[in-house]
Image (cartoon, rainbow, N blue to C red):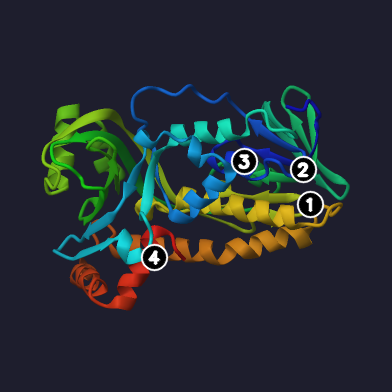
Amino acid sequence: MIPSDEFDILIIGAGLAGASLACALRGSRFRVGVLEAAQTPCLAEGWDARIYAISPANVAFLTRTGAWPRLEVQRMQAVSRMDVRGDRGGRLQFSAYDAGVDALAHIVESNRLAGALREAVQGAAGLSFIPGQAARLSLEEAGARVNLTDGRVLRAALVVGADGAQSWTRAAAGLRATTHSYDELGVVANFACEKPHRATAYQWFRADGILAYLPLPANQISIVWSTPEAHARELLGLSHEALAARVAEAGEHVLGGLRVLTPAQGFPLRQLRTSAVVAPRLALIGDAAHGVHPLSGHGINLGFQDAAALSEVLQAAPAGRDLGDMRVLQRYAAMRAEETWMIQRFTHGLHELFRPGFAPLSWLRNAGMDVAGKIPLLRSMAVRYAAGLW
């Protein structure tokens, strides 16, 4: 690792999006710094309650960065089929074969993915991980400067904000963020199943929210139940046995009885839009740039595609070109605008259509689900949306 406080690119945030950008820039001509607020936690033996469904495009991206091959195969699960059910009998089923891919997604634990990304860049020439907390950001014509709380000063041609939905970097740069709260929590937990899941992901659009079963190895599942806060608090207060019974019942007992493996956790659900994802000497990626409802699992996939696009733009810039120049950064913004807009609009619209307690459109939304499964064009659109193949 290099000790210099002068960088071509300074990434603020060492989470999944920031670490993936560092991986993508590994071996480039750039001096890259990653400012991390805390040390990476040690991996626990048990299953992480936070898991992600990684799209085929991002499996390819993470393979190119060198992180994907470092993941333990026995801790990943390919999704071969999707079974989506409405609140009044509507149903839509499709498979990886329908999408023309080996898997619709791969289910990976958050902490294992973070560890693989860190391992992929460990000891890479020209790359530094810097523990510390940013206190002030200055974006000037001559370069960017980040003052840390301990008095150190870091300088770079380009600062990348990868510090999450509550991004300090975004706020310090004066970029506005508009947040829409869904007044819901995402309740997550892992379970052992009585019946085999057969690599199938299930999703129920229920009157009390959206419940997803995501397959894990060894006949286990991870669930995400996006539900109004009052109901979420009730679920979080249940005993393990009562929670397992409630989740099994809500999932129509498709996998038989369930047994809790990891305690339930809850996190607030919001959509986030920013006034811009670039400014002179600044670019935003991941949750710092956008936020979506988790019903489709596209959140981290958008972040990885941000990292892929930004690394491509930066490495394509001619040697000697100022990386903080808006003519460079606007290429990145243009590359990411359409997909981000489409995912946010579609996901928000789908949530509103199936919003808990919104009964007037019940027949229409369930009929639409059935029709989508029978019309090739609509079915293809649904499959490509689920697999992130825009």
Question: From the viewer's perspective, is 70 left or right of 83?
Answer: right
Q: Which residue is mark 2?
A: 30
Instruction: Check disc 4 and report the residue beneath it.
Output: 384
Q: Residues within 10 Å of mark 1 (few under 14, many from 20)?
A: many
- Against 96, residue 195 (above or below) is above
Of badges 1 and 2, nearer the viewer stands 2
- Identify the amino acid type marked 1: Leu
* Residue 266 seen by the camera: yes
In the depicted structure, whether residue 89 falls above or below residue 201: below
According to the picture, the residue beneath numbered tag 3 turns out to be 23
Front label number (4 vs 1): 4
Using the rendered image of the protein, determine whether residue 290 is visible from the camera's viewpoint: no
State the CA–CA distance, disc 1 to disc 2.
Answer: 10 Å
Residue type, label 3: Cys
Q: Which residue is mark 1?
A: 323
- Decide which of tag 3 and tag 2 comes sooner along the chain: 3
Answer yes or no: do the residues labelled 4 and 1 have beta carbons within 8 Å? no
Q: Residues within 10 Å of mark 3 (few under 14, many from 20)?
A: many
Q: Position of residue 331 (x, y in %)?
A: 70, 63
Residue 372 position in % (x across, y down): 26, 73
Mark 4 to mark 1 CA distance (whole Å): 34 Å
Please state which amino acid type lies under the numbered disc 2: Phe
Where does the N terminus fall, quadrant-wise? top right
Element at label 3: helix
